[in-house]
Amino acid sequence: MRRKINLLLVALILIMTTSFAYANMGTNESNTFKQNLISVYGIHLNSGKLPDAPEILYGEQKKVDGLDVTDITFSSFDGQKIPGEVIYPKGFKTNIKYPTVLVFSGHGEMEELISKRESYQHAGGVGLAQKGYLVYTMENRGMGKLAKMGDHLVLDAVSRLQGGSWYGDITTDALYLSAAVNAIPYVDKQKIGTAGVSTGGALSMLVAALDDRVSAAYVQGYLGTYEKTFTDGTHDICNNISGILNVGEMWDVGNLIAPRKALYVNGEIDHFHIADAQVSYAKIKDHYTQLGAEGNVSLLSPQGVTHEFSTQIAADFFKKSL
């Protein structure tokens, strides 16, 4: 009897040791991919360390659909002043902590998230603030208030001279915004989400992958594969990150978010085709399942939805996730 117990103990120890080894191997592979991802995108982080919080400067105020909206600026890695907006929920008070969403803009101007409901971004930032969220947005380099910097493809070409990319630069800007928001006293640090469509979806996914202070990521009109989605000739070439396929695939980015909550949305008639999204999602779902968190990730393809921001779907997701 004692011999049987000893054998069971040995077997249990072997199982535990093997499980720990596999888990450790997975963590090491994840960390290696993260560092490679930072490198190929040209994301400006010192030894992979997230930036310290920059000071947010507040500017002009306006009303949009009955909500207070304030201009903000913050300095990024190269001293560039990045414009943004903060949208306050109705009845906002500084002594209350609010669930907060960083809503990133796609190709176009940040104002499409604020007042231009007719745009493909459908004033999604204001829409989420109307649901009770504190919302922060920022302008992408080469667009909107930063159009004076030059076309974003020219900025991309210049960044590539040093092994970077336009995406690397704006992802860094987004990480600086995330750092700033995490230092604000009325932000609920346990309830921070990211959201966006198209380039905004890419930023939502990348920021959540690199900053584990993000609790939930809403990614619309972006999920696919680097190998197929961005080689079919229908997407802006800024998406083609030099060397990305040498280090991994888009599902590896999604795996960095696990086991935190994520919702991927590719509309039925989005030119980011649902078939491409399903390839990456299958890998992401499998990873979540291995972590015992399969309920934390989903993929939707709503009927009749094209390349656009679905505010209500995002709001429903954050209501459950934040």
Image (cartoon, rainbow, N blue to C red):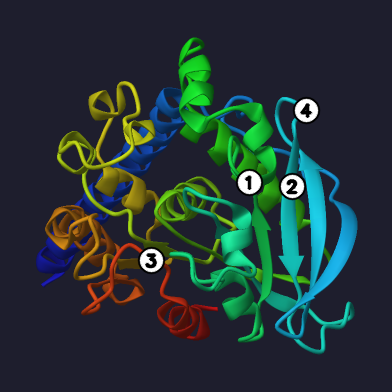
Question: Secondary structure under badge 3?
Answer: loop
Q: Secondary structure at mark 1?
A: helix
Quadrant location of the N terminus in the rendered image: bottom left
In front: 195, or 191? 195
Q: Are marks 2 and 1 in contact (CB under 8 Å)?
A: yes
* Local crowd size for mark 2, using a 10 Å CA cut-off: few (<14), some (14–19), many (≥20): many
Indicate whether 58 appears above or below 120. Answer: above
- Identify the residue under disc 1: 144
Q: Which residue is mark 2?
A: 83
> Residue at horizontal 70%, vertical 83%?
65
Q: Position of residue 34 (x, y in %)?
A: 42, 36
Q: Position of residue 256 (x, y in %)?
A: 39, 49
Dot in front, 2 or 1: 1
Q: Earlier in the sequence, mark 3 or mark 4?
A: 4
Say what amino acid the circle numbered 2 marks: Pro
Q: Are marks 3 and 2 in contact (CB under 8 Å)?
A: no
36 sits left or right of 182 in the view: left
- For the C terminus, the quadrant is bottom right
First along the sequence among labels 1 and 4: 4
